[in-house]
Structures are given as structure tokens and as C-alpha cells.
Amino acid sequence: MTTTRPVAPPASEARARVQAVTQRHARRGGRATVRGRAYPAYLVALFTVFYLVPVVHARSTSPAPFSVSSAHFPAGAATLVCGLAVAVCWGGQVVGRFWGPLVVQPFLLHVLMSTDLSPAHYLGTIARRRLAYAGTVTLLALCSAAYLATDLFDRPGTALPGLAVTAGISAVAAAAWLWGQVRPVRDNFLLAGAVGASALVVAAISGTAPDGRYGHWLAALVPALLAAAVGPPAFRALPSIDLARLARESARASQARDYAWTGTLHHALDLYRPQPRGFTSALVRTDGSLRGYLAQGAVRALRTPGRAAAAAVLLPVGGASSTHGVAGSGGGPEWWWWAAGSVAVYLGSGWVGETWRGLRDELTMAPLFGERWGGLPARALTWPVVAVTAGTFLGGALVALFRWPLPAGRAGSTVLLVAGSVVLVLGARFLREMKLQLPLELLLPVITPFGDLSGLRVVAWQFDGIIVVLTGVALMNAVPSATGAAALAVCLAAACVGAGLRRTGWAHRGLLSRLRRG
């Protein structure tokens, strides 16, 4: 008996076969149509005309919020660059675990998997093309942010080092994105540890240099070398990739894309929500009764350890950033610290537990759970309110200790403004979590001299929580009195609660009577 061993096709033949399969699949409807490309281009044009052009014009005619004081980078700039590189690298790894560059349309992946081609032949081209796109987008985003927020590109002495730093960070972001998808969890932890250690070493070395003269070149060279060291091993791992896991990721990404295009972005995000596991028996005492509201929320948070760990990091960091911005003299860069911290607290408030979803389900399914509220608000909201408040004020207390004593008359106003920010964030989170299907009236045309702006209404509905937080912080910053700003935050939070209840169908005349009966 003779056995035949499949012979791998040459690289040129494999490339031609992959291109033929891709073109055939594009003719089946997978290729984007002119109308499908016109609408995103239309939204980009509106964003450019109404937002980007005014912001760039304002930046070119006014001083930058953050100034690079000398012809070279200041001594602490290398430390900030290292921190940014670490954040971008870790973020690329995390994104790669959920939606990496090798995620393709399920049918096309099924066709390619059914052939005798090696995964490196049909995945390598996709990976190289998408990594080039990701690196370019990251480079443009970093350069744009640096231009709008600093005077980095105003002088030749800082423009060239700044461009080198952004290029190095963009390269390591693209390489980390692929590494996070194709390498196992253990290798990702090793890369994360190596990047963190390298950042500490670079920051320490640049701090010893006179005036940080060569620290920026070192901060640009290390990410580039790291990208060159990570990229080739990631591509060499393509032949051994788990195709079954890649098929599941592609199917989930396709379903999430369909949800996002039909307006239900929160349903798309729910597909990536980890399933709670473990600690089921911890919800019940030994005598068979349920534990208290706070203990129930803590146990449910521990059932999703990844989300709970992210919340445990974001809440103190957001509280520290908000306190740092509020305790400043007001105006300028302090508002950016305040806004960034409030957004971090908003994100952490959603990851702190699963009780938000339970509250939404019970409010929207009244015939199943009954019309009487009882202890529903207390049972669902005790844990997120306590956890968000404690985490935010923990980070704020650490900042206050390092900056003590605070400027004259700023201690009481700082506490009021941070507390108002927490109330505003909780109201915005309630509004976000009570979201159901996309309202049909948002799809109706909004005719203006600039065209149909209904797409902007849909975008605002998708990101209403973040819009409320940023708008609320800006209004609070404009109010001269801390007491007035805190009262404004409470009013905005109450409006968000009312809007959230209307989304669930509970905001009608019988609401107060039901609350009294409960």
C-alpha cells in the first residue's frame, strides 16, 4: 500500500489561489458597494467640517494647552512617552485577544480553511495589510493629538524627535495587536512584563541624562526595537494558529458588526461580555437566606474577575485624575484632567458588576417580575454606588495627600466637585444601561442646509453616556461656584435617571403610586 503526502504549493501559486478565492467571494456580495462607502465618507466629511476644522483653526491661532518649554524635550517627557508606549502596547494586546487583525468574514475563512493551503499563505497577506493600516491610523492619531494638545510640532527641535517617538509607538502598537491574537496567554503576560520593565529602565536612564537631551531618542528607539523583535515571531506563529478559535472569533465579530450597523451597539458589546462563573453558593448564607445587598453585588462582581479587575484600576485612576484637575487653579489643562478622570470613572462604573443589567431586565419585564418595586432599587444600586464612590474617593485621597496642603479655599470645593462628578457619572451610567432597541424616530431624516444629519443623532444615541459626562463636566467647569456646579451635576443626574426610566417604560403617572406601594 502506498501513501501520498500532500505537497505544499509554491508561494506564487498559493498567492494566486488566495487572490482568486478572494475575488470570487467579493463577487458574491462581500465587496463594499459605492452606496455603502458613501455614507461613512459623508459622516467623516460632516465631522471634518463641523469639528475638526474649527478645532485645528483654534489651535493654530492660540497657545497650546501643554507647552514643551525648551528646544529639546523636558526631563520628564521620556517618562510620559514610556507610559504612553506601555498603555498602547497593552491596549493592542487586549484588543487582539477579542478582535485581532486575522478576523475575517466567516464564509471566506471557511472556504480558505477547506483548501490545502497553509494558514500562513492566506492569513499572512491579511495580517500585513491590516497591520499597515493600524500603524498608519495610530501614527496619524498620535500626531494629531500631539499637535492639538502641545506645541511639539511648532519647532524643528522638537518636531523631529516627536515624529520619531510617535512612529515607534505606532509600530509597537501594530505588532502587539497581532501578538495578542496569535500567541497564548502566557506569552502575552511575558510581553506585557517585558514592556513594563523596559519602560522603567528607559525612564530611569533618561532621568539621569542632562536636561533629558537624549531621552526622547531612547524613548523612540526602544519601541522600534521592540516592534522589530515582536513582529517576526508573531508572523511565524501563523501556521500553528488555532483555526477553530479563529472561526469562532470571526463568527462573533460578524454578528457584532451586524448589530452595530443596525444601531444596537450595546447588543454588539454584549457579545464580548464574559460569562459569570463560580461563587454561586456564596450568594446564599448557611441558613439558606440571601446575603445583604452589598455582599450580593460584591460576589456578582467577583464572578467576572477580568471586568472587576479593570474597574478596580479605572476607578482610583479616574478619581486621582479628577481630583488633580479639580484641585488646580481652574481652566487650561486642569479641565482635561478632570474630563479624562470622569470618563475613566464612567467606564469603571459599568465594569464594577452585573447589577446594572439585572436592574434593566427587571424594569423592562414587569409582567414577569411583577409591578411592585419593593427593594429593587436598593438591591440593584447599592453595590455600584458604594463601589464607584469608594474607588473614586480612594484615588482622590491619594492625590490630596501628595498635594497637601491644597491651594487656599480649594479643599471644600474639591470635595464638592468630585462628589458632583461621581453623581453625574452614576446618572449617565444609569441612562446608558437602561438603553433598549434603537428608537425608530432616530432614523427619520433631519433636513438642514448641510444635508441630512440623522446619522449624527444615531451616533449621539450610541455614545450618550460619554457625551453626558463630557458635557456635564464642561458645564460644571464653567460655573464659578463649587456649590452651584455640584447642584448642576445633581440636576443633570436626575434628568438622566428620568430619561432612563422613560426608556424602560416606567416614567408615567403610575410610577409614584407604585413606589408608594413598594
Image (cartoon, rainbow, N blue to C red):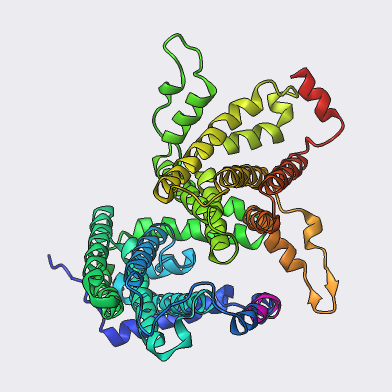
What's the residue at 70%, 42% (across, down)?
490
* Image label count: 0
Q: Is residue 269 above or below residue 31?
A: above
Q: Was residue 49 drawn as part of the magenta stretch in this picture?
A: yes
x, y percent for residue 284: 46, 18
x, y percent for residue 326: 56, 53
Q: Which of 176 and 105 is in front in this view?
A: 176
Residue 232 figure quarter? bottom left
Say whether residue 224 is visible: no
Say whether residue 426 is visible: yes
- Viewed as shown, does residue 339 lie left or right of 273? right
x, y percent for residue 1: 12, 65
What's the residue at 23%, 75% (across, down)?
209
Q: In which quarter of the image is the C terminus?
A: top right
Q: Which of 500 and 401 is in front in this view?
A: 401
Q: Was residue 325 drawn as part of the magenta stretch in this picture?
A: no
**What segment is highlighted magenta in the picture?**
46-54
Spot the residue most to the front: 408
- Viewed as shown, does residue 289 lie left or right of 14? right
Spot the residue most to the top: 287
Q: Is residue 449 above or below residue 179?
A: below
Spot the residue most to the left: 1
Q: Nearer the viewer, residue 431 or 117?
A: 431
Secondary structure mostly seen in magenta is: helix
Q: Nearer the viewer, residue 499 or 34?
A: 499
Residue 514 figure quarter? top right
x, y percent for residue 404: 43, 47
Spot the residue most to the bottom: 156
Q: In this view, does 154 lie above or below 303?
A: below
What's the residue at 78%, 38% (across, down)?
505
Residue 195 figure quarter? bottom left
